[in-house]
Image (cartoon, rainbow, N blue to C red):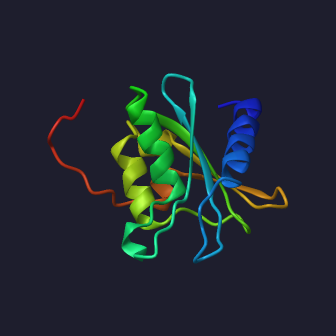
Amino acid sequence: MTDQQRDSLVQAAGRVRTNAYAPYSVYKVGAAVLGSDGEIYVGCNVENVSFGLTVCAERTAIGTMVANGCKRMVAVAIVTDEGATPCGMCRQTFAEFADDATKVEIITASETGERQSYWLSDLIPATFRTELKVD
């Protein structure tokens, strides 16, 4: 992945973060997924007073990717106040749509522009898998 692609992902995540619906936590998150088709898909967190119904920005972006016909991801950028890493549920969701977790880059960024980069395999080394071949 190029530096320009990384910048584009972080910028897209930062822009969509402003649309987050976070009245309870007041913790806005934006995510941008680079699909294997070269397109960028975005999502923001959407909270609910029934907290279990809250949807993370990362999973919203993955859902947008799938809804647009792409089922494999290459990278994701996540923008939060301080550059937090994704939760376990989001990590497992990424693994579902990654051909090789050692090649999926996760970029976290803060409001101030500080960035950190990880490989998905580092964030979720013991991914749950099935032998079932999924398209």
- Left or right of 58? Residue 2 is right
Q: How many marks?
A: 0
The image quadrant of residue 75 is top right
* Quadrant assignment for the C terminus: top left
Q: Position of residue 46 (x, y in %)?
A: 52, 60
Which residue is at 60% across, 68% downward? 22
Q: Nearer the viewer, residue 33 or 123?
A: 33
Q: Position of residue 100 (x, y in %)?
A: 40, 39
Q: Position of residue 40 (x, y in %)?
A: 59, 32
Which residue is at 57% across, 44% downward? 76
Q: Position of residue 106 (x, y in %)?
A: 58, 50
Which residue is at 44% across, 58% downward? 90
Task: Name the residue furthest top.
Answer: 37
Residue 72 in sight in this render: no
* Quadrant assignment for the N terminus: top right
- Left or right of 90? Residue 107 is right
Residue 118 in sight in this render: yes
The image quadrant of residue 125 is bottom left
Task: Name the residue furthest left.
Answer: 132
- Left or right of 110? Residue 20 is left
Q: Nearer the viewer, residue 87 or 66?
A: 66
Above or below 111: residue 60 = above
Which residue is at 60% across, 77% downward? 25
